[in-house]
Amino acid sequence: MTAVPAVALRGVTKRFGASVAVEPTDLDVSDGEFFSILGPSGCGKTTIMRMIAGFESPTAGTIALDGRDVVGVPTRRRDLNMLFQSYALFPHLSVEDNVAFELRTQRVPRAELRERVAAALDLVQLGEYRGRKPQELSGGQRQRVALARAVVGRPKVVLLDEPLGALDQRLRKDMQFELKRMQRELGITFVYVTHDQEEALTMSDRIAVMSRGRVLQVGSPTEIYDEPANRFVASFIGTCNLLDATATGGVVRVEGVGAVPAVGATDGDVVVAIRPERIRLLPADAPGGIPGRVVEHAFLGDHWLAKVVVGAAVAPMQVQVPAAEGARLLRGIEDGAEVALDWSAADARVLPAEPAASSTRTQEVAA
Ligand SMILES: Nc1ncnc2c1ncn2[C@@H]1O[C@H](COP(=O)(O)OP(=O)(O)O)[C@@H](O)[C@H]1O
Ligand SMILES: [Mg+2]
């Protein structure tokens, strides 16, 4: 087995004038992987994609595709294809001819061309629509044509930059599963950019979480959800309660509460990160529980949500309560009622209090 990454970035940096869009970045995308770059708008995702594609040159660093250094190599000579949100189909060509266009310019023999176009259209389930013009298709179908066109040449890597951004929520969800299925069937490496954490979790083998030009963590969906490396990743992926705390010799204390279950490796100011579904809601008199007050609660069908203030914390903790537990402890209670919380030390991650500071960046906009 060779382990040459399909895409490898080393020290890749991009400056626009005085501002840094991408801080020095190392990334390895494995062959055949569905790899996502996830982060809020303005964090540098598109800039990284444009450098991989060859539309922008890095200010510093190297990019290798399949082990070959490609800095300076024009886009058309990189073994990749792209699908961006603002893709354009040829309006006067049929679905089939849109997909065949690139193969024709490459003078692929007729029989092979027909076979490959048919296979690509089958893959996106548009075989029956091969004769239609783009304007006779729905938005989702047009997007699939663009996808068929991006993969028909069997590139080593396909770059997808928020390709589902223009679709409505329902169609997005369907397309997420479809994209993943197609990627598996094709065995092509996908590098996928999104600001939507659920989308990244649904599809990816691994995710790089970015903020302000930096990759903060790379991991599988479960790794970044269960073992966030810092405060930003913890709060950007799903919902996470963050408690300011102080760690001394492995004991983690929250002001106004005292010691809480958590295993801290570092001493000093820390943040305890704990997911709503990992917290148990208990009656106020439960032994060993952390006392709190319910300030809001709601029944959400398959579970209840309670907001519970503990200690001197200003923000209430969000607690996801299983339906049966909620019916017993929350149904009919007054807000302000006393309860207790508990969680396992293993579910409470102790993170550095401050995220890594970044210098010259312009303020990023929340997605
Ligand atoms: N051509 C450019 N000239 C100047 N600044 C740019 C250019 N392209 C992107 N930027 C800036 O770089 C940062 C990252 O942008 P971008 O990569 O598009 O973010 P994302 O795709 O994550 O939303 C932003 O602050 C953006 O304004
Ligand atoms: Mg972008």
Image: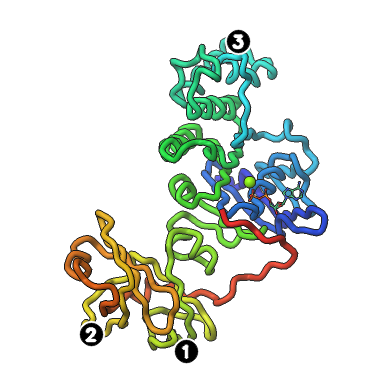
Is 324 displayed left or right of 142 in the figure?
left
Say which of 84 and 263 sits in front.
Answer: 84
Q: Quadrant of residue 21?
A: bottom right
Asked if one can make out residue 225 in the rendered structure from this viewpoint, the answer is yes
Residue type at tag 1: Gly
> What secondary structure is marked by label 1?
loop
Q: How many marks?
A: 3
Mark 2 near ligand 1 (CB under 8 Å)?
A: no
In front: mark 1 or mark 3? Answer: 1
Residue type at tag 3: Arg
Say which of 2 and 68 sits in front.
Answer: 68
Please name the residue shown 53% across and 29% down the image: 143
Q: Gap in Å between the C-alphas at discs 1 and 3?
A: 72 Å
> What secondary structure is marked by label 2?
loop
Counting from the top left corner in percent of width and height, residue 295 is at 33, 73
Residue type at tag 2: Pro
Vertical relation: 324 (above or below) 184: below
Please name the residue shown 74% across and 44% down the image: 69
- Mark 1 Cα-neighbour bin, 10 Å: few <14, some 14–19, many ≥20: few
Query: Which badge, 2 or 1, comes first in the chain's sequence?
Result: 1
- Mark 3 Cα-neighbour bin, 10 Å: few <14, some 14–19, many ≥20: few
Quadrant where the image shows the N terminus: top right
Residue, disc 2: 287
Query: Which badge, 1 or 3, comes first in the chain's sequence?
Result: 3
Q: Gap in Å between the C-alphas at discs 2 and 3?
A: 77 Å
Q: Quadrant of residue 93?
A: top right
Please name the residue shown 47% across and 33% down the image: 182
Q: Are marks 1 and 3 in contact (CB under 8 Å)?
A: no
In front: mark 2 or mark 3? Answer: 2
Residue, disc 3: 110
Vertical relation: 115 (above or below) 359: above
Asked if one can make out residue 156 in the rendered structure from this viewpoint, the answer is no
